[in-house]
Amino acid sequence: MDLIFPPTCVICGKIEPEWICNKCSYLLRKEAEAECGCIENFNNQESFSELLYLFNYKGIIRDLILKFKFQSCPYVSKVFVNFLLKNEKIFQKIEKYDTIIPVPISKERKKERGYNQSLVFARELCKYLENVVLIDNCLYKIKNTVPQSTLTKQQREENIKNAYELKNKQIIKNKKILLIDDIYTTGNTVNECAKILKAGNPKNIGVLTIAKD
Ligand SMILES: [Zn+2]
């Protein structure tokens, strides 16, 4: 397949086996180094203890995430994970977790998009983590909500309410959970998911997103 459809740079389109060429990689690395971050202890306002993110949601990163989500390009996750692996600050923090749970999408959305971008990203990341288990059979999205990005702050909270369900909750007992999502905006989605996960009595919950808006 690679001969007929060779991998190309996800940004500039040049043929590139690593999915990103040196020039574009350099541009992204500059952004990632300047902008990745960690916010801890939200004064108990949130249901999770820390937020880790790789980029700010703007410019080429924004374009790349939109491509990843909406243009049937799951392989873009490889580029994001590659940046994460080179980022010691974030990687060291991630290694403290033992369980990875991607934010789920509804059945309807899955059918429409073909894949859950957070699961694709989580799977790719797990290839490089030892002693970490990916769990995708405990948190489910049971309501097909309107995309959060189209709503006001207040509407977002209402929209996401009762949208998730916890099954097999015994498997997350005492686990150190890293919840994975693509973009952090108001935090309503991950906060709601973390709230639901808490019913399974995990040890702690942190959040990792590709970008923060
Ligand atoms: Zn390129």
Image (spheres, rainbow, N blue to C red):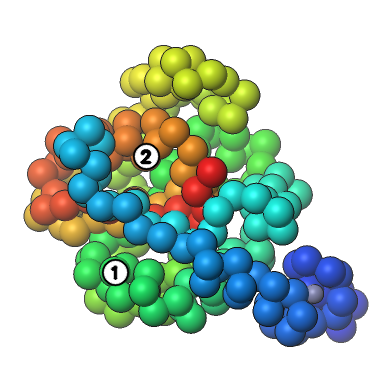
Q: Residue furthest right?
A: 4
The circle drawn on residue 137 is none
Horizontal side of residue 187 vs 168, given as left or right: right
Q: Is residue 20 above or below residue 179?
A: below
Horizontal side of residue 60 vs 198, given as left or right: right
In the rendered structure, are the residues bearing label 2 and label 1 in contact, judged by CB atoms less than 8 Å apart?
no
Q: Is residue 8 above or below residue 170?
A: below
What residue is disc 1 on? 93
Q: Residue at x 77, y 80 (%)?
A: 23
Name the element at disc 2: helix
Task: Give coordinates of residue 105: x percent, y percent.
Answer: 49, 38
Q: Residue furthest front?
A: 34
Residue 57 visible in the picture: yes
The residues tagged by marks 2 and 1 sit, at their Cα atoms, a distance apart of 18 Å
Task: Give coordinates of residue 198: x percent, y percent.
Answer: 17, 39
Which mark is in front, 2 or 1? 1
Q: Which residue is at the front of the view, 146 or 200?
A: 146
The circle drawn on residue 190 is 2
Task: Give coordinates of residue 69: x percent, y percent.
Answer: 65, 48
Q: Is residue 177 above or below residue 201?
A: below
Task: Name the amino acid type tagged 2.
Answer: Val
Pick whichever of labels 2 and 1 is earlier in the sequence. 1
Q: Quadrant of the C terminus?
A: top right
Task: Name the amino acid type tagged 1.
Answer: Lys
Q: Residue at x 53, y 67 (%)?
A: 34
Horizontal side of residue 182 vs 162, given as left or right: right
Within the displayed image, which quadrant is ligand 1 positioned in? bottom right
Residue 47 visible in the picture: no
